[in-house]
Image (tube, grey):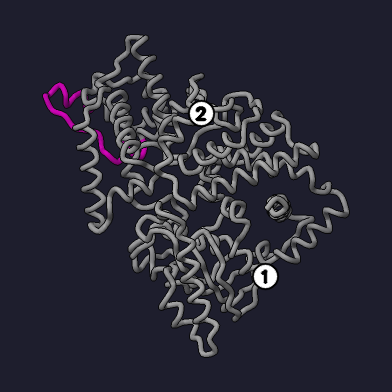
C-alpha cells in the first residue's frame, strides 16, 4: 500500500493527492503578517494547553473559522452598501451534491480509499467539512455567480489585478455574450479552485484584522477577527474529536517546553520585548519577499510547524535565547563555531549517506495519520522489541529482516518509474541530511517536541556497518545501518563565506536552544 505521507516527504509537497479536493481555501497558510501591535498577556497554564491543542491539532479549523468570519463581514458590508450578495443561503442538498462530487473524484483515482478517512486526515470532522463546503459555495455565488451580469467587476479587478486584465476580463465578456444568446457555461473547476478562490480568500485575509494568542489575547479567547472574540472553549469543543493521543502528547510537550523556556528567560532578563520580537520577526519575513518560497510555506511545510501561531511562540523563545549565547565577536563564540564544524561538519559540507532503515510504523498507511484509539507507540514498541531480539541473533541477516519487517513501501506516489527518490522498502538512496530528514518525517518542530532526531544520530554519531535501534521517531520505531558515506565537496569557510556563516550560526542557535530547553524539561521530571 502506498503511504501518502511519504510521498509528501519525497516530493516536498503538501499532504496527500486528495487534499485540494476538499477545500478551495489556501491550504494551511494562516496568512499575512499581523496588522496589530503585539501586547503580551499572561494567561493560565490551562489556557496555554488548550490553545496549544487548538493551534496544532485544530489549525485547519482555525483557518476555516477565520475565513468564515471574514466572509460574513463581506456579506454584511455588501448588504449595508446595497451591493449584490447572491444566494448565500446554501441548502443541505447543495452540500450533499458537492460531497458526492468529491467522493466520485477520489474513488475514481483509488476505489480502495475510505473517503471519510481521507477527510478526517485533512483535519475535518463531518460537521466542519460540511461547513467548509457551505462557505466555499457562498463565496463562489458572491464573487462568480452563474449570471455574469452579477459579477462584482470592480472588486474582482482590484483583487485579481493584472490577471483580471490579462484573461478573466475577456472570459467575463465572453460569458456576457453567451448570456445574450441564451447560452451559458460554468467556469473551469480547476481555475476556480486553484487560482480564483484562493486569491479571493487571501484578499479577505489581507483586508481583515486577525489576532492570535501570539499577538496578545485575554484568558478564554483563542482568536479575534475584526474585533470579535472567538472563545477558546467553543473552538476546543469543535476540534476535540480530531485530536489523537499522540498529537495531544506532542502539543502538550510543546506548550510545556515553551512555558519553561519563557519563564526562565523572563527570570534571567533575556526575554525579548514585544517591540524587539516584532522587529526580528518582520526582518525574517522580509528575507522571503520576492522569493519563490513564501515565509509561511517555509515555516509550515519545511520547518514543519502545525501553524504560524506555534512558530511565533517558538521564534520568540529561540531568539530570546540568542541573547544567552556569547557575543559573536568573542573568543567563546569562535570556540563554539569550531566545535560545531568539528561535530556537525558533515551537514555543512553536504556529505551524503546511504542508510538502510527498518521502519515499524504507527501511522495509517492510507492517510499518514495517527490512529484515534489509543497510543500506537505502545504496541509498536512491543514489535520493535521482537525485531531487536531477531537482529541480536548471531546469524541475523539484515537484508532479509528488513524485507520481512520494514513498513516502508517500495515506491510512493503510485509511479513506479518516478524520478523522485524512492524508499525501496527502507534501503534509502544516497542523500544529504536534509533529504534524509524528509524520509524520516523529521523537521524543526518534531526535533523540538521529541528532543530527538534520528537523522542527526545517523550523520553525527554513527559508524558504518553497525546496527542501531530501536529509536522512537515521528513515524514509529526504527532500526538503521549505514552502508556508505560520500564526503561532500563543499569547503566550509565561516570567516569569508557569508552563507556558510549564516547556516552555521543558525544551526548552532537551534542546537543550543534545544539543548537548553531539554535541560529545563529534564530538571522538572
Residue 461's label in the rendered image is 1
Principal SS element in the magenta part?
A: helix
Marks 2/1: CA–CA distance: 44 Å
Provide the secondary structure element on which disc 2 rests: strand
**In which image quadrant can residue 198 be found?**
top left
Q: Residue furthest left?
A: 182
| Residue 268, image x, y percentages | 80, 39
Q: Residue at x 49, y 76 (%)?
A: 387
418 sits to left or right of 145? right
* Mark 2 burial class by Cα count in 10 Å: few <14, some 14-19, many 20+: many
340 sits to left or right of 435? right
Marks 2 and 1, the one that precedes in the sequence: 2
Q: Quadrant of the N terminus?
A: bottom left
Provide the secondary structure element on which disc 1 rests: loop
Is residue 175 one of those drawn in magenta?
yes
Q: Residue at x 59, y 69 (%)?
A: 352
| Residue 212, image x, y percentages | 55, 30
* Mark 1 burial class by Cα count in 10 Å: few <14, some 14-19, many 20+: few
Q: Residue at x 67, y 64 (%)?
A: 349
Q: Residue at x 30, y 18 (%)?
A: 85
Q: Residue furthest right?
A: 331
Give the magenta range: 174-195
- 289 is higher (above) or lower (below) than 34: below
Q: Nearer the viewer, residue 139 or 307?
A: 307
| Residue 221, image x, y percentages | 53, 27
Q: Nearer the viewer, residue 156 or 261?
A: 261
* One can see residue 290 in this view: no
Residue 223's label in the rendered image is 2
Amino acid at each position: 500500500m502506498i503511504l501518502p505521507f511519504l510521498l509528501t516527504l519525497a516530493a516536498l509537497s503538501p499532504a496527500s493527492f486528495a487534499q485540494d479536493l476538499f477545500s478551495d481555501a489556501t491550504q494551511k497558510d494562516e496568512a499575512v503578517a499581523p496588522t496589530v501591535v503585539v501586547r503580551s498577556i499572561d494567561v493560565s497554564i490551562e489556557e496555554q494547553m488548550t490553545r496549544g491543542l487548538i493551534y496544532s491539532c485544530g489549525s485547519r479549523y482555525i483557518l476555516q473559522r477565520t475565513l468564515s468570519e471574514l466572509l460574513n463581514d463581506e456579506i454584511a458590508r455588501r448588504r449595508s452598501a446595497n451591493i449584490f450578495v447572491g444566494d448565500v443561503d446554501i441548502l443541505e442538498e447543495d452540500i450533499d451534491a458537492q460531497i458526492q462530487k468529491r467522493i466520485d473524484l477520489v474513488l475514481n483515482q483509488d476505489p480502495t480509499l475510505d473517503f471519510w478517512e481521507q477527510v478526517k486526515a485533512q483535519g475535518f470532522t463531518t460537521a466542519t467539512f460540511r461547513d467548509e463546503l457551505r462557505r466555499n459555495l457562498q463565496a463562489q455565488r458572491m464573487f462568480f455567480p452563474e449570471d455574469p451580469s452579477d459579477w462584482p467587476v470592480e472588486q474582482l479587478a482590484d483583487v485579481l489585478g493584472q490577471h483580471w486584465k490579462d484573461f478573466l476580463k475577456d472570459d467575463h465578456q465572453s460569458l456576457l455574450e453567451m448570456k445574450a444568446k441564451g447560452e451559458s457555461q460554468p467556469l473551469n473547476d480547476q481555475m476556480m479552485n486553484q487560482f480564483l478562490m484562493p486569491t479571493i480568500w487571501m484578499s479577505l485575509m489581507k483586508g481583515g484584522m486577525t489576532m492570535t494568542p501570539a499577538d496578545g489575547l485575554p484568558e478564554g479567547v483563542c482568536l479575534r477577527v475584526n474585533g470579535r472574540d472567538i472563545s477558546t472553549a467553543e473552538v476546543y469543543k469543535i476540534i476535540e474529536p480530531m485530536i489523537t493521543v499522540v498529537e495531544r502528547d506532542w502539543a502538550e510537550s510543546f506548550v510545556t517546553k515553551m512555558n519553561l523556556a519563557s519563564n526562565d528567560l523572563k527570570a534571567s532578563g533575556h526575554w525579548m520585548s514585544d517591540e524587539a520580537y516584532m522587529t526580528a520577526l518582520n526582518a525574517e519575513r522580509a528575507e522571503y519577499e520576492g522569493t519563490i518560497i513564501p515565509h509561511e510555506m517555509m515555516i509550515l511545510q519545511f520547518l514543519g510547524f502545525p501553524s504560524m501561531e506555534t512558530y511565533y511562540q517558538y521564534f520568540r523563545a529561540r531568539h530570546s535565547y540568542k541573547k544567552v549565547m556569547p557575543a559573536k565577536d568573542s573568543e567563546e563564540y569562535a570556540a563554539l563555531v569550531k566545535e560545531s564544524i568539528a561535530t556537525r561538519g558533515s551537514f555543512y559540507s553536504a556529505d551524503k549517506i546511504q542508510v538502510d532503515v527498518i521502519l515499524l510504523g504507527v501511522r495509517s498507511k492510507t492517510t499518514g495519520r495517527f490512529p484515534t484509539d489509543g497510543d500506537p507507540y505502545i504496541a509498536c514498541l512491543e514489535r520493535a522489541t521482537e525485531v531487536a531480539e531477531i537482529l541480536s541473533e548471531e546469524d541475523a541477516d539484515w537484508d532479509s529482516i528488513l524485507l520481512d519487517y520494514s513498513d516502508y513501501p517500495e515506491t510512493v506516489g503510485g509511479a513506479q518509474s518516478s524520478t523522485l527518490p524512492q524508499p525501496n522498502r527502507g534501503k534509502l538512496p544516497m542523500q544529504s541530511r536534509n533529504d534524509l530528514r524528509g524520509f524520516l518525517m523529521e523537521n524543526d518542530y518534531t526535533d523540538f517536541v521529541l528532543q530527538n532526531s534520528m537523522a542527526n544520530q545517523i550523520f553525527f554519531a554513527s559508524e558504518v556497518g553497525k546496527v542501531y535501534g530501536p529509536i522512537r521517531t515521528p513515524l514509529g520505531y526504527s532500526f538503521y545501518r549505514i552502508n556508505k558515506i560520500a564526503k561532500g565537496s563543499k569547503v566550509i569557510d565561516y570567516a569569508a563565506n557569508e552563507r556558510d556563516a549564516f547556516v552555521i550560526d543558525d544551526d548552532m542557535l537551534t542546537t543550543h536552544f534545544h539543548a537548553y530547553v531539554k535541560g529545563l524539561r529534564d530538571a522538572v521530571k
